[in-house]
Image: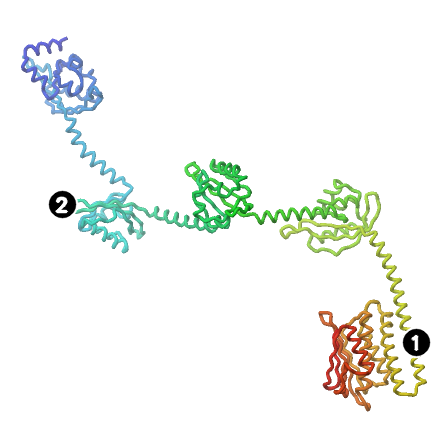
Amino acid sequence: MRADRRMKESQKKDKPYRKIFDFSPQVIAFIDSKGNVLDVNKRVYDWLGYQPKEVVGKNFLQLPFLSEKSKFTVKRKLAQVFRADNIPPYEVEFDTKTGEGRTGRIFNIPIRDKRGDRTEIMVMAFDITERKKAEQAPRESEELFRSIVENSHAGIMIVDDSYRLTYINDKGCRMTGYLQKEIIGQDFRKFLDEESRKLVMDRYVRRQRGEKVPPRYEFNVVRKDGEKRRVEISSTVIKDKSDRIQTVAQILDITERKQAEERLRMEKAYLDRLFESAQEGIVMSDPAGKVMRVNSEFTRLFGYKRKEVLGRNIDELVVPRRYLKNGISITNKVAAGENVGFEAVRQRKDGKLMDVSVLASPIVADGEVVAIYAIYRDITERKQAEERLRVSEEKYRNLVELSPDAILFLDMKGDITACNTFMTKATGYSKEEIVGKHLTELELLPGEDTPKYMKLIYTASKGEVPKPFEVTWYHKDGTAYLSEIRIGFIKEEGKNIGVQVVARDITERKQAEEKIKSALNEREVMLREIHHRVKNNMQIISSLLRLQSRQIKSKKTLDLFNVGQNRIRSMALIHESLYQSSDLAKINFSDYIKRLTTHLLSTYRVGMERIRMKLDIRDVCLDINRAIPCGLIINELVSNSLRHAFPSDQKGDVQVIMNANKQGKYSLVVNDTGVGFPEDVDFQQTETLGMQLVIDLVSQLGGTIKLKREKGTKFRIVF
């Protein structure tokens, strides 16, 4: 009430001054000793948004535009004024009605009463908000700049026009390894390697001349410890207050980045190499299946060129139409983040179908599938091989099952792992009774022979396959039968994993063999008897001729009789040899020729001291169809040598050589060192019975005959 009354009285009494008071550019207020606001001008509204009536009559501690801190300051200052202290102006922070912050510079002027006591204080507040902002901006800007520079991740430096460093921040010092005091004032080129020095100098000079140069480039900085670091520089040219040119540069240490880039480049090159040289077809697509990249093997595998594949949907490209729905479903699974591996049929560009194995996986970045890669391997040959193997196994299984032999499969311990159907018929045991048991548990073998046969099976498991052997097996009902056992081992990856036993019932075969053996013995006895009788008959004929020859007086006729006897004798020796041989089918010709030539020497009464007989017969065996013609040929040729090659008791040699080559051809050579075969006689056109007989017999053998007249006579026959 006091304040209102004072305000009204003042307005009436000092009306001219009131206008000056209200329109003053400063806020003016009167406050009593208790802190109550007695009066305030209208500027308070313009400045703080409050009407004078909202302020007058209130204690300043209740004023809403003063913060607690400002109230404390004003209270302290007013107290000083009332104590007669002279105080300088001070600053107080205000809050406008709209919440905006303002700064005021406060002057406190004491007002005295008639007695001279200080009863009121005139407070004048000057709005210095804008000035404070203007003063604060450069400081804040400078502090901000300094903070940015000092805390920058980049090295920042200033170089003057003499190449001297006038400023460098902490990061720049750490980058070079020098202290700031070791750098300031130094030529900046000192900290570069030779190659970088030339590059930086060129850019530095051109930039200072105002030429346009790249704003960023890279070079090497040499640290105090000698280590080279790769840096990237960005610089600009400025002028100082003295209008001198200076270069402000920002340098980033990119050594690790460059190393990472190089590793990334190498890794990319390595991955690209792996991708391109992979033996499988590889395709990368986006999550929708659109092809982004393929390797060479993919194009070879499916018959496409790269440009024909890129941008197309992988499923529409290689999945046959009837499998397209399934192919799209698989792509969607992978796009959802699932790894998928499967085998399927895929289609080449030419329409040919092939079996492939596919491994498809998502490529995830930041938890999101960004691409799909799929690896295709052509397994057509493997599938065909598997099918062949399946068919082969089926055939083998059928062969085993339908085999008339009992077949067992044992593991390395002798336990039966499988058997065929005939095994159940042959033994009387069911498969359930056989499989899973040890061979000795079935009582198939005689008790005393079991260890011996188990040893043979064990030997087979070591890779030493025994020869087939015979054993008596027993049926479940006790019936015995004779079996031939063959044992083989089963391998897997070069390692023995089991034994196969094949048992063949040979009871009937053995009985048949006994019958055949008995029949053969009878036949052999009969053949020996025939050869013996033929030999005896020929000897009788020979004896009759010899008796008859005693009545012959003509030497020529007698010779003919002797020749005939020798021919009969040569054939008789054949039958005698067969009769005495253990093999009725073949004759040991070595022994035969010895006996024949001995007989001829005796017949022609030739002593060994005059004519030497040399034989070289190498294990030649002939059947009777070739033995008789060959024996007659030797008889004729040796007889001719003994009768005609050595006249007048001349001495010499007669040689018989016979052998066989690898092709089954026989070579027979009869030669002598006598007077030789007459030059004017063609041995193939003679009228003598002996040579005609030789030619005919060689033809009968399907052979050839040649004659050499050098140093005697030499006949060579090949058949």
The residue nearer to you, when weighing 35 against 558, is 558
Residue 332 showing in the rendered view: yes
- Tag 2 near tag 1, CB within 8 Å: no
Q: Does residue 274 appear anywhere in the picture?
A: no
Q: Say which amino acid is labelled 2.
A: Asp
- Quadrant placement of the C terminus: bottom right
Location of residue 423 by image quarter? top right
Which residue is denoted by mark 2 in the rendering? 243
Disc tally is 2
Residue 234 shown left or right of residue 671 in the figure = left
Residue 650 quadrant: bottom right
SS assignment at label 2: loop
Q: In this view, does 321 lie to the left or right of 480?
A: left
Callout 1: SS:
helix
The percent position of residue 51, horizontal first and vertical second, equals: 16, 15
Given the image, on which type of amino acid does mark 1 rest? Ile
Q: Nearer the viewer, residue 604 or 151?
A: 604
Q: In which quarter of the image is the N terminus?
A: top left
Q: Earlier in the sequence, mark 2 or mark 1?
A: 2
The image shows residue 171 at horizontal and vertical percentages of 27, 43
Classify mark 2: residues with Cα within 10 Å, few (<14), some (14-19) or many (20+).
Answer: few
Q: Position of residue 147 (x, y in %)?
A: 24, 37
For the residue pair 97 and 653, the one nearer the viewer reads as 653
Report crowding for label 1: few under 14, some 14 to 19, many 20 or more residues within 10 A (C-alpha). few
257 or 72: nearer the eye?
257
Q: Distance between the residues labelled 2 and 1?
A: 155 Å
Of tags 2 and 1, which is closer to the observer? 1
Q: Name the residue under label 1.
A: 540
